[in-house]
Image (tube, rainbow, N blue to C red):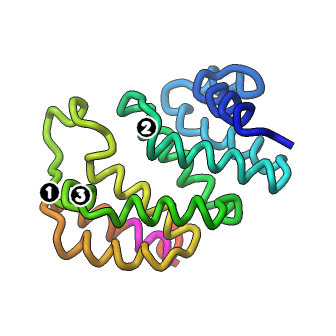
Amino acid sequence: MIILQEAKSLVSAYFSGSDPFSEVQELVGHFASQRPDVFLKWFSKQEVEDQRVIAQVLADSALFTEGTSGEIFATASLLADVARQFPSALSPQNIQTLEQFISHGDKLSVWLDDEDTEDDEMKDARTRWRFALMLWNVLVAVGSPVASKAFDRFVQQARDPEFVRGITLAKRVHERGPFGF
């Protein structure tokens, strides 16, 4: 069984491209989009209990760990991929933490007011609506009722029309699949 510290090391190994994820270093340019597939293939071979520990590390890292915007977005994106393919990997406690985070009034108002600008890289990643969209994708994947409430609020009150467009498209893809069927 994987313990929490080992799971943190494994997640770090993925992002640094070290063993057992050394093949991600070879995926550059447009092939870099295949990097999460390396992690997901490895993840699929882990025991359910180990998947839960790893998913906990991803969730905690996305929500609370210090890092650059790129690191936070990459972690949240990987968490969304895990949730989409392995929704049972997220424990009820992880889901509850994500639900509380996305529903928190202060964070919610910041996301609703956020607009894309040229200086977005200077902002804290967790204050950007794109981060809220990633969290919403996680909650939708695990069937959380909070996702529906968040969607309604985002669509009705978001200041940036790109946020509304992005979350509406994400909902459509979730409901109909990537090709609209």
Of pointers 1 and 3, the one earlier in the residue sequence: 3
Q: Residues within 10 Å of mark 3 (few under 14, many from 20)?
A: few
Disc number lying in front (2 or 3): 3
Verify whether residue 68 appears in magenta. Answer: no
Q: In the shown orientation, is residue 165 left or right of residue 70?
A: left
Position in image of residue 7 (x %, y %): 71, 36
Position in image of residue 113 (x %, y %): 14, 57
Taking depth in this image into account, of 23 and 142 the one nearest to the observer is: 142
Please give the name of the residue rendered at 41% of the width and 72% of the height, measured from the top-left corner. Answer: 171
> Which residue carries the number 1 mark?
113
- Report the amino acid beneath label 1: Asp
> Which residue carries the number 3 mark?
106
Highlighted range, magenta: 170-176
Say what secondary structure mark 3 lies in: helix
Relative height, residue 167 to residue 72 (above, below): below
> Which residue carries the number 2 mark?
72
Say what secondary structure mark 1 lies in: helix
> Residue 131 bears which disc, if any?
none
Taking depth in this image into account, of 67 and 13 the one nearest to the observer is: 67
Please give the name of the residue rendered at 15% of the width and 50% of the height, measured from the top-left corner. Answer: 115
Of pointers 2 and 1, the one earlier in the residue sequence: 2
